[in-house]
Amino acid sequence: MPRSFFVLALTGLLAGSALGGWTPQQAAPLPAELSQPTTTDLAALRAKYVGKQVWLYGGGPLTCVTSNYSHLTLLGPPWTPVRIENVELAQKPIMVRISKTNVFAPRPVAHALLLTLRVGETLKTVSSSRGNAPTESPQLVTGSGCETVIQPFVDENHLRRLLSLTPPPAEIQSLWNNKTPSNIGLTHWQMLWLRGAPDSPPLASVAAVLQAGVWVTPGPAGYGDWITTFQNGRVVSESAPRQAP
């Protein structure tokens, strides 16, 4: 089982996944950025994002691909911003990862969005692996270091699931630093900032995530899933993977 899976799980940054229970709950009002329609126009995307500070739901992860094709997984606190330096379209088809836990295989995207993000020292490496140079896209290579990363996205909807132009609510830092074993009573919005957007169904919009009655994070084979249930917009129950007897 990949080491990175356990690293993400133990940091508490895995996303919940919205499966069943899609009856709308009492969702928090959407920030203005999420109320705007998405676009595929490159000029409009550049005007909207380039030069802007953004915050990462769940603190990431971002993936850095170095010149020797090592893959470094980067995470950090969600209240620390990173900066978007460029937005462009991939010139060749590229494999885009659409889930944090690799439950869903990367999918080929003909004209993926490539965001160049300056992260500096705000994010830390939590896992690494060696890629296969002949199958890697040179469009994602950032050099020997990871102060800048190039992150691929299927489209703007996918981008919105990771990045916010609006900083997290003030209470998120306190909740993050004073984690308790239970998330009972937290809202969808707080859970989104603490865990990140769900993996399943893949690429569901943030608006849909904030109305889901159940989030399910697929766990490792034979261990079950993380299941978070909401009622009236707040967490009422949780369960975690455990090894079958």
Image (cartoon, rainbow, N blue to C red):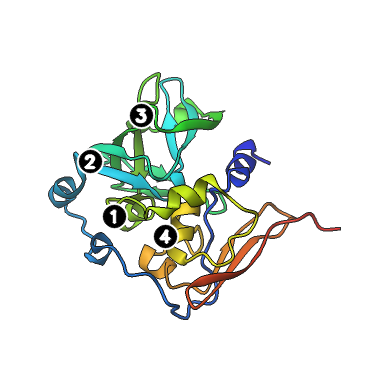
Q: How far from the left and from the top, in percent, is residue 173?
A: 44, 47
Residue 150 occupies quadrant: top left
Q: Which residue is mark 3?
A: 138
Locate residue 125 relative to residue 122 in the image: left or right: right
Please state which amino acid type lies under the numbered disc 3: Pro
x then y, percent, for residue 81: 33, 40
Residue type beneath disc 4: Leu
Q: Identify the residue shown where x is 32% and y is 32%.
A: 139
Question: Which comes sooner in the sequence, label 3 or label 1?
Answer: 3
Q: Nearer the viewer, mark 3 or mark 1?
A: 1
- The amino acid pointed to by label 2 is Glu
Mark 2 nearby-residue class (10 Å; few <14, some 14–19, many ≥20): some
Give the distance between the C-alpha atoms of the residues marked 3 and 4, in whole angstroms: 25 Å
Marks 3 and 2, Cα distance to the nearest angstrom? Answer: 14 Å
Q: Which residue is mark 4?
A: 203
Q: Marks 4 and 2, how far apart in space?
A: 20 Å
Secondary structure of the residue carrying numbered label 4 = loop
- Residue 106 visible to the viewer: no
Q: Are marks 1 and 2 in contact (CB under 8 Å)?
A: no
Label 3: state its secondary structure.
Answer: helix
**Is 60 located above or below residue 231 in the figure?**
above
Q: Between disc 4 and disc 2, whose residue precedes?
A: 2
- Image coordinates for residue 111, horizontal then vertical, percent: 28, 47
Report the Cα–Cα distance between label 1 and label 2: 12 Å
Give the residue at x 36% y 52%.
168
Quarter of the image for the N terminus: give it. Answer: top right
Residues at marks 3 and 4 touching, judged by CB atoms closer than 8 Å: no
Residue underneath mark 2: 88
Q: Are marks 3 and 1 in contact (CB under 8 Å)?
A: no
Which of discs 3 and 4 lies nearer the camera? The answer is: 4
**Labels 1 and 4: the sequence-earlier one:** 1
